[in-house]
Image (cartoon, helix red, strand yellow):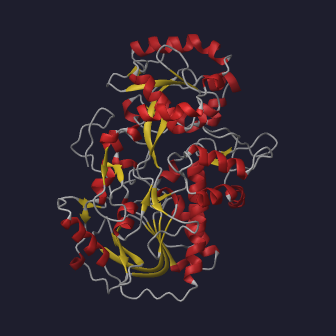
Amino acid sequence: MAEAYPSYMSDSIRKVEASRSQRLQRDLTELKMPEEEHDSLLNRYHPDYRTEQFAEVRVGPNKGDVMPREIVKLLEAYPTVRPEEVNLDEIDYDVEVLIIGGGGGGTVAALWAVEQGIPPEKVLIVTKLRHGDANSLMAQGGTQAATAEEDSPVQHYLDTMGGGHFENKPELVKALTEEAPMIIEWHRELGVMYDRDENGNMMVFPGGGSSRKRLHCAEDYTGMEQMRVIRDQVRNLGIPVLEFTPAIELLTTPEGAVGGALLWNLDTHQYYVVRAKTTILSTGGFGRLHIQGFPTTNHYGATADGLVMAYRAGAKLRDMDSVQYHPTGAAYPQQILGLLITEKIRGLGGQPVNKEGEVFVFPLEPRDVEAARLIKECEDGKGMETPYGVQGIWLDTPLIDAIHGEGAFARAFPSIARLYKRHDIDPTEFPILVYPTLHYQNGGIEINGNTESSTQGLLAAGEVSGGVHGKNRLMGNSTLDYNVFGRRAGIQAAERAQESIEVGELTLDHARRYTADLEQAGIDKSKKSPLILPEYRGKRTLNRLLDFPL
């Protein structure tokens, strides 16, 4: 028995091992829930339906909408900068396109803006950490694209709409699914090394909520592999990147259009004023807000900065009542609590199993349904409790080698294998403990098919935007999202650059007006946003049992 597991957990593992041969022979599709049962399960067990955890927004374009309390606190906070502190007449950078965010969406947008004719020096990427420090880099599972003969963009469209509970914006889903095969081909031309079989054919894998195999993977490093290639291309083209320099406020013209941003250097505490014909927000999600106290798969900078800045400038948000909790985040050991355990494991045969060794759910339900079912099993007393009081479900990872042959797990999931072996757990011999973890911001800035927000001059791409995924995202559609809409944002920015746009005077008038609205609503002046970085100092170790107020 693995020495890393306490003896009482090892007793449960023996039950998992004892039932393995029987489960291997079982047709698990019999566990697939009828569509009509999804809503009742979600209503009772999914965190999105805990109404006491939500609050009504009192100011701004979405006034009256209900969102997670953690988001409302940021939207109802005062700007971190006072307008009188900065001289907006002194322009530090004057560019055609300003891209805020150095993850996948921003990087792709920069490449396509240059592809469409904007000189590299007239594009500027600014990022709060290093170029590539983003959820895009951390994506494991793959990218969906209907490239197989038995598949089609139409089928991909239907799966995506169904997975999002048909609350997606159809024009965005149409763009996402129709352009997916082209994105894979673009990646191939750039040098992305997707998994191939012994004959050199690109392999595709299953994903939850998908009716066809269409995941294109690079082992379990898909995001890292894509970012490796597109980031190198940005450097090859000489596109400027400002690192450790987050945007803290958008800048607007007297007419209300976005004309750039105010930046803040984390090292020197110096302001920079950027003027741009087009500003693209690609700042990612809000995982580090730890919605409802959940741990997260997200990178350190995922603090909803883009939402806050866009909202103050008048951009409308959508689907902000929906959060994705990935069904399988690490639950043990505590050092890796919440880290992503890719859905691809379940796609290749790994089964969620309770403490009695029983399989209780179809492994590839849509993510919200799968997560709700795991939560139910734990609330019913059938989860495995860790020494630090966190519940979890066994993910029977040794099944991968049992089904596909010795060495299959190590080949498909090298990063996960190394992650656990650091803690003396071998996933090819013993199951691993998982529980839903905060993974993705389903909603965001509402955009149209050209990635335009409701505020002139402001585009958005990737996780910061809303409408693509509706109320639930399918696996493999996130990396596709930032590629498709990052590309569209870059092309749209290039088209705008060819127009006779004169930005002219830059102001913080929108921030002044927003401050006045906050004061009129009687909102406490002690709260400031954007958050920039999460604050962990002086707090107890985060886990699901703790309240984690901002």
Residue 78 location in percent, x, y? Answer: 24, 64
Closer to the camera in the image, 541 or 484: 484
Residue 311 higher or lower than 419, as above or below:
below
Report the residue at 37% width, 23% height from top. 386
Residue 361 location in percent, x, y? Answer: 55, 25
Quarter of the image holding residue 11?
Answer: top left
> What is the number of callouts on the image?
0
Residue 433 higher or lower than 110, as above or below:
above
Report the residue at 51% width, 70% height from top. 452
Residue 241 placement, left or right of 509: right
Q: Is residue 235 visible?
A: no
Residue 202 placement, left or right of 121: right
Q: Is residue 537 visible?
A: yes
Closer to the camera in the image, 312 or 55: 55
Residue 315 placement, left or right of 357: left
Closer to the camera in the image, 437 or 156: 156
Quarter of the image holding residue 346?
Answer: top right
Residue 383 location in percent, x, y? Answer: 42, 21
